[in-house]
Image (cartoon, rainbow, N blue to C red):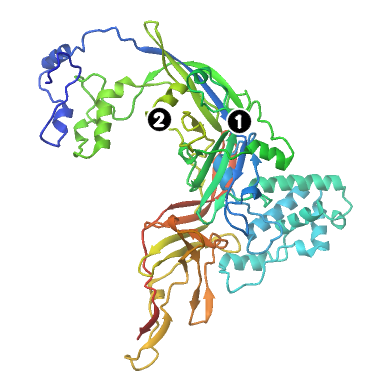
Amino acid sequence: MNNYTMWKRLEPHTQTQDLEPGLSAGMADPLWMLLRQWQMGELTGDDGGSPIAVDIASSWTRFTHYLPGGTVPGGGADPGALAQVAPIGASSKPLEAVVEAEPVLRPGAAGGRETPWFAAVQAGRSLRRHLERHQLASVADTLAEHFPDVLFQPPPPSEGIVEGPVESRYRALLAGKVLDGAKVLSILDAAGALPAPALDGAGPAAVQAAVDAWKLEMEEDWGITGNTVPAWSDPALAYSFQVAAPPLPPDSFAAEIHPAQATGQVLMQAPGYNGTGMTWSSLDIAEDAGETLAARFQREQAIPAPPPDPHDGDGFSEGDTGHHVRTVLPAPLVFEGMPSNRFWEFEDSQLSLGRGSAGPTDLVRMAAVDFATVFSPDWFLAPVELPVGGVARIDWVIVRDNFGAATLVGTSAWQALDNVGRMFQPSATLGRGLEDVPLLAVLPSAFAAIESPPLEQIALQRDEGANMAWCIERRIMGPAGRGMDRPWLDQEFGLPAPDTADAHELVWRLSTPVAQAWTPLVAVKQDGNTRPILRKARILATEKDAVRGAQGFIMAGVRDVNDEEVTRSGIEVRITDQLARGYDGKTYVWRGRSKRPWLGEVSSGLRYDATTP
């Protein structure tokens, strides 16, 4: 016991690391338990009020613009002015679908490597169905008769492209027999409508209505290449984008106490989203470099952003920004395994706090046990309803107790002036005034999206023995758009069997063999940059005197990869189709990429200028 005359809490000091004796609170006599309750003051009332109502004032602003910042097709990273600002104010799509969605139909590249055959065929069949619904079935036949180039015709097999049994079936069953939707889209992009000879006497307006309905369906189901810049960055192997929202409504408390509260647009960025699901921590508050996204959209597009639906299903019809005050009933915070509020009270036999062992340096576990046993009864839960797809701020909180007293327990300005860390707040770029504002990003995320088996799957791993990294293609997309496994065996790394009777004869080799599915990533230094990059290379197959490299879709456009992205644990990158339901109740399907940690380092045994048997 300490030397103070008054104390509220005893801190025991034990000579062991076992927490069980103190936390188990063993006892043998119920009367002794009642005596201890009386002695500890648990049977004595006090004048402490209990919260019965909480008034919460909140403000919000919705995301209205989206700016991708990935790799320009055929160019480098960080396109800057080439990127297109897109409005998302009226969109109900999950943010993952907006960021990750890759176009599947690519007009102008129909039948080639860029357009999956299955998508081109299904788009052609969908066009025929739309024409039949409008009693225009003869237009599809006339189109194929007068313009045979719109029929599906895969290119001849190439040595550099791996094909499987699916591609063989497409060639045998569908070549020259069905419409190619990607080729029809190319004609529409060039002429704006189907050519007059293909109308077969039908009304142009009726045909155009059927074609417009078909294009809308293709855009929703597959996505069509436009002038947009993708959010995926090849060097970083991650998504990069920004979202913007109008200024938050002014807060009177903030104006008096903390004038640095934001008055400009809220700009948030995700410099390295890995495609595994969007959470509040995926976004950081960014610094606005001059022109706002909204102004830039107005300048580049010359049309206003679409207004949000005043009845979009989330219960908030105030527009892009809003403010409201709600009174809610607080409830004690409970969690699984929570101890009883009173120390000398029988608890569930399934709970054993004494099993929470911790060592002298295990501070996190000790803090969790301390919170559960001492402070957990002091926390209450007061839910606040906020609109989805924006940034929110709690302006102030007033707690009313059962004695009628009302207490102002906190404001956003006081939180900004406080140096205590806050949970669930995105980090910020210093120097703009938003880094101290307690903001909460409420994202329209696709929780528990249904993911298909990987259409393509590669692994990037370090090889310290060869002083390089490898891209190992485990599964790639064939020309038909279906995944094909690329298995490799240990025998592919072995030396060929000797073809002479003299087993002691030595042979000079330019390099030792490496499996077909392995592509080297060689470290090189860029001019003016001290950090090396990993550049995709190719291997000379000496037995065939041919150069081979990666054949998958992921590595097709990759030239360099940032060296820091390929860690010692390795990374896995995959392409999958995903399905999720938006907060408007609709289902959305998109094709995207994801990056995850992998299985560690790898050894190829590659040697150059080797003399072997």
In the rendered structure, which amino acid carries the disc numbered 2?
Answer: Arg
Furthest residue in direction top, as rendered = 403
Q: Nearer the viewer, residue 394 or 553?
A: 394
**264, above or below 235, in the image:** above
Instruction: Give the CA separation, mark 2 to mark 1.
Output: 24 Å
Q: Position of residue 222 (x, y in %)?
A: 64, 50
Name the residue at 69% across, 54% down.
123
**595, above or below 413, in the image:** below
Name the residue at 41% across, 61% down.
461
Secondary structure category for the residue under label 1: loop
Q: Nearer the viewer, residue 576 or 528?
A: 528
Residue 524, can we see it?
yes
In the rendered structure, which amino acid carries the disc numbered 1?
Answer: Pro
How many labels sit on residues? 2
Name the residue at 65% across, 48% down.
81
Q: Which residue is mark 1?
A: 246
Q: Does residue 421 appear to the left or right of 73 in the view shown?
A: left
| Residue 281 location, quadrant | top left
| Residue 180 location, quadrant | bottom right
Secondary structure category for the residue under label 2: loop
**265, above or below 220, in the image:** above
Residue 132, can we see it?
no
Quadrant (top left, top right, bottom left, bottom right) of the C terminus: bottom left
Q: Nearer the viewer, residue 581 or 84?
A: 84
Furthest residue in direction front, as rendered = 528
Q: Which residue is mark 2?
A: 422
Quadrant (top left, top right, bottom left, bottom right) of the N terminus: top left
Q: Does residue 275 appear to the left or right of 30 in the view shown?
A: right
Q: Position of residue 210 (x, y in %)?
A: 78, 46
